[in-house]
Image (cartoon, grey):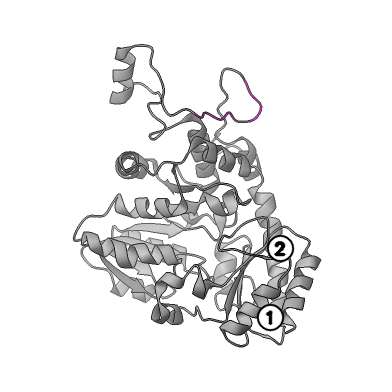
């Protein structure tokens, strides 16, 4: 099913591979290994001369269906599913890096992504330069002879900073650098970085893909050549494989992701507009607000503004905590992209690992609140926010 049907059809039928039992819903293969008809067949499969499954750490029919469906939605040639979004981030970089290499990264990152780049990669002798990703000149002037990767999130977590994907990826290609884009906030429904020239795209299946707080998972989308020659050998032998059950949950969740994300994005925009005019709100971050500094770029790259809204309450951490604690519908959680609306205080949770200086430089202040807008009635969500802001 390639280059034939529209996205909505792929959401339901992409990658479908029925067993001999001809089941309606995709089958769940909860086995760790596979058997062969002969020693000769086993040899041929391990040599790659014959197609066949070997071991679920390598591949599995259920996992393969999820990978093929997500690749179709993302617009990439191939996909490799992993145990979590962070294993996808780490694997996508480490599979192509060695001691002496250099990475250029946008500073605006999720706490764990920042930790990998700032704390873990240097332990392997890999140099990392953090820049203002919004400025193309910053990318240009930080290129070195040993630069191997450009890494960035767009939109970023939590302040929704937008990077010009096309410009950065074009610069990467001119200098034979691999562009790795974290597309978790937008999801493959609202943005396809491959259309703007991205080489590798990262997803957390835990977020919008599942979107219902049930399963961990991640994925790396790329060209077939990158997957087969660079990514697969690393991930197969280091073992961050997704379980077949989690892959099945994510596969089934893809059937409804567009309906969910579109509806959540519509509600998020309404909430952002409501917050923007409130007397107790200092600043609102939402890509599809006309007041957003990168509004034009966001409209160019994304189909909708997304499910996430960040804003600063007038006051300090005390006022932010008071608002969070007064909410009755929004659950306090560091997850995002869920059908249930969630609220997070980034300074003390998701971005605590960054340290005070790094947080301040990124605008992650004690009065910043991050909302993940769910599928509840928009009137109820607005009323909940307004009553919590009264104080």
Q: Is 213 above or below relative to 341?
A: above
Q: Residues within 10 Å of mark 1 (few under 14, many from 20)?
A: some
| Residue 217 lies in the magenta-colored region | no
State the residue position of label 2.
266
Q: Residue furthest top?
A: 38
Give the structural element (helix, strand or loop) at label 2.
helix
* Dot label at residue 99: none
Q: Which residue is mark 1?
A: 276
Q: Residue at x 51, y 30 (%)?
A: 30
Q: Is residue 371 left or right of residue 149?
A: right
Q: Quadrant of the C terminus?
A: bottom right
Q: Is residue 188 left or right of residue 126?
A: right
Q: Quadrant of the N terminus?
A: top right
Which of disc 2 and disc 1 is earlier in sequence?
A: 2
Q: Nearer the viewer, residue 317 or 43?
A: 317
Vertical relation: 132 (above or below) 43? below
Residue 335 visible in this rendered orientation of the protein: yes
Q: Which is nearer the eye, 339 or 170?
A: 339
Magenta highlight range = 22-30
- The crowding category of the residue bearing disc 2, from other C-alpha atoms within 10 Å (few below 14, some 14 to 19, many at least 20), is some
Residue positioned 50% across, 35% down in the render: 244
Report the residue at 69% width, 86% height from top: 280
Question: Residue 125 placed where, x, y %?
Answer: 20, 62
Q: Position of residue 303 (x, y in %)?
A: 62, 60
Can residue 291 be spotted in the picture? Answer: no
């Amino acid at each position: 099913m390639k280059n034939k049907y529209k996205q909505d059809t792929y959401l339901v039928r992409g990658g479908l591979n029925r067993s001999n039992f001809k089941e309606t819903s995709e089958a769940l293969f909860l086995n760790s290994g596979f058997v062969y008809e002969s020693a000769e067949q086993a040899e041929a499969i391990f040599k790659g001369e014959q197609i066949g499954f070997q071991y679920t750490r390598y591949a599995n029919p259920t996992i393969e269906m999820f990978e093929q469906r997500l690749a179709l939605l993302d617009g990439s040639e191939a996909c490799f599913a992993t145990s979590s979004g962070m294993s996808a981030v780490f694997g996508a970089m480490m599979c192509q890096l060695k001691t002496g290499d250099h990475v250029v990264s946008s500073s605006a990152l999720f706490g764990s992504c920042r930790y990998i780049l700032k704390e873990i990669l240097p332990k392997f002798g890999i140099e990392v330069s953090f820049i203002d990703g919004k400025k193309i000149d910053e990318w240009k002037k930080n290129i070195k002879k040993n630069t191997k990767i450009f890494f960035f999130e767009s939109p970023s977590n939590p302040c929704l900073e937008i990077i010009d994907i096309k410009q950065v990826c074009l610069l990467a290609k001119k200098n034979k650098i691999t562009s790795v884009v974290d597309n978790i906030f937008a999801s493959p429904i609202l943005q396809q970085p491959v259309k703007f020239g991205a080489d590798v795209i990262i997803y957390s299946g835990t977020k919008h893909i599942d979107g219902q707080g049930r399963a961990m998972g991640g994925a790396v989308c790329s060209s077939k050549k990158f997957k087969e020659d660079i990514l697969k050998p690393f991930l197969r032998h280091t073992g961050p494989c997704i379980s077949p059950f989690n892959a099945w949950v994510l596969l089934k969740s893809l059937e409804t992701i567009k309906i969910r994300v579109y509806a959540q994005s519509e509600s998020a925009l309404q909430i952002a507009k409501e917050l923007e005019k409130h007397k107790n709100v200092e600043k609102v971050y939402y890509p599809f607000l006309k007041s957003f500094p990168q509004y034009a770029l966001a409209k160019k790259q994304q189909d909708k503004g997304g499910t996430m809204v960040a804003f600063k309450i007038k006051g300090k951490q005390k006022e932010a905590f008071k608002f969070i604690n007064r909410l009755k519908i929004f659950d306090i959680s560091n997850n995002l992209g869920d059908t249930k609306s969630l609220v997070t205080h980034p300074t003390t949770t998701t971005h605590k690992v960054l340290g005070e200086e790094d947080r301040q430089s990124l605008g992650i202040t004690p009065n910043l609140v991050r909302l993940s807008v769910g599928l509840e009635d928009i009137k109820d969500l607005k009323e909940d926010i307004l009553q919590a802001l009264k104080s």
